[in-house]
């Protein structure tokens, strides 16, 4: 039975044994190789893809003359760090021998999915715990050791991170913690001024913390931004919130985990 490793790619690439001790992975190219293999989640990666990840044109050198031999040598170095059984040779490439949940990116995605499902099902307490665990996995930009941060894969990871932060704030509101979560929601809304779900979350946080007038001002500000930058009107969610704020109506019942719910007894710290 080989040694089990935990791979971290949500930040600079790191490897840890089961007992928590770190495995040194020195050198930018070695980390890039490991990141590219980890990103595949145990699936084979073709030689050409690995070469492109390891020898970027931006590093001043570009691919080596004998790409397969150079990659084989680098794989040999990685095997000396992790053990030969950790990286398997397959037809046309290599693969990391690993369970997906031992790679923080895939563990994050699982926790994010489960947390979002719990929130939608009305279990804000469970959602908060799962989403906190997901957020705790992030140490910096995703896939930081790949060229351009992993390109589309890095962008998708960052977009998922934003969605988790939104869901975590939504769980806090459902738990009656509007005052605590409001500063974090303000910051997120400022960073993403055209994100309508996030702007709706800000309106809810303002409303639930007793700042109805400020919520109306925020609605007007986002309405103008959407018109000026995108040429569109606010969507149905924002319009419904606006009507509610104008009429002073209470939010419609939406289950224990919905934005109008209250669970004062459960802890819900602000999202990261």
Image (cartoon, helix red, strand yellow):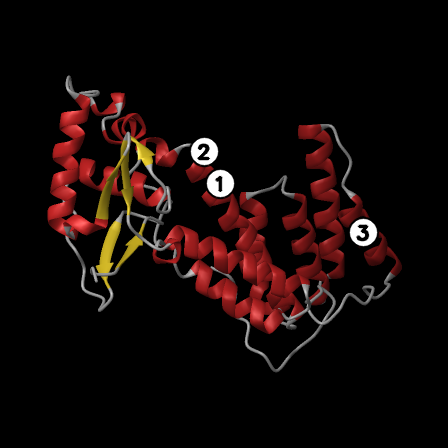
The answer for how far apart the CA atoms under marks 3 and 1 are is 31 Å
Q: Nearer the viewer, residue 227 or 104?
A: 104
Residue at numbered disc 2: 152
The answer for how far apart the CA atoms under marks 2 and 3 are is 35 Å
Name which residue lies at 19% across and 51% down: 85
Residue at numbered disc 1: 156
| Disc 3: CA contacts within 10 A as few (<14), some (14-19) or many (>=20) | many
Q: Is residue 126 above or below residue 61?
A: below
Q: How many marks do you count on the picture?
A: 3
Q: Nearer the viewer, mark 3 or mark 1?
A: 1
Q: Position of residue 64 (x, y in %)?
A: 16, 20
Q: Is residue 111 above or below residue 225?
A: below
User: Are the residues flagged by discs 1 and 2 in contact, CB closer than 8 Å?
Assistant: yes
Secondary structure under tag 1 reads helix
Q: Position of residue 264 (x, y in %)?
A: 64, 79
Q: Is residue 103 above or below residue 250?
A: above
């Amino acid at each position: 039975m080989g040694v089990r490793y935990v791979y971290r790619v949500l930040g600079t690439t790191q490897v840890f044994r089961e007992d928590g001790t770190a495995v040194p992975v020195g050198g930018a190219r070695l980390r890039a190789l490991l990141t590219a293999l980890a990103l595949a989640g145990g699936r084979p990666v073709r030689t050409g893809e690995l070469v492109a990840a390891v020898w970027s044109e931006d590093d001043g050198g570009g691919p080596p003359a004998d790409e397969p031999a150079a990659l084989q040598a680098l794989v040999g170095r990685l095997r000396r760090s992790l053990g030969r059984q950790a990286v398997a040779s397959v037809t046309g490439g290599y693969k990391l021998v690993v369970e997906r949940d031992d790679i923080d990116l895939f563990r994050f995605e699982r926790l994010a999915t489960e947390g979002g499902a719990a929130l939608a099902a009305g279990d804000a307490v469970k959602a908060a715990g799962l989403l906190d665990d997901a957020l705790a996995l992030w140490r910096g930009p995703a896939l930081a050791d790949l060229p351009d941060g992993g390109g589309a894969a890095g962008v998708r990871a960052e977009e998922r991170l934003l969605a988790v932060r939104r869901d975590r704030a939504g769980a806090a509101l459902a738990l009656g913690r509007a005052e605590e979560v409001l500063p974090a929601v303000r910051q997120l809304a400022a960073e993403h001024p055209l994100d309508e779900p996030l702007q709706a979350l800000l309106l809810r946080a303002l409303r639930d913390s007793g700042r109805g007038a400020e919520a109306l001002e925020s609605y007007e500000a986002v309405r103008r931004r959407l018109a000026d930058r995108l040429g569109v009107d606010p969507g149905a969610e924002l319009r419904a919130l606006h009507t509610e704020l104008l009429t002073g109506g209470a939010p419609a019942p939406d289950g224990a985990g919905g934005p109008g719910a209250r669970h004062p007894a459960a802890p819900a710290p602000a999202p990261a």
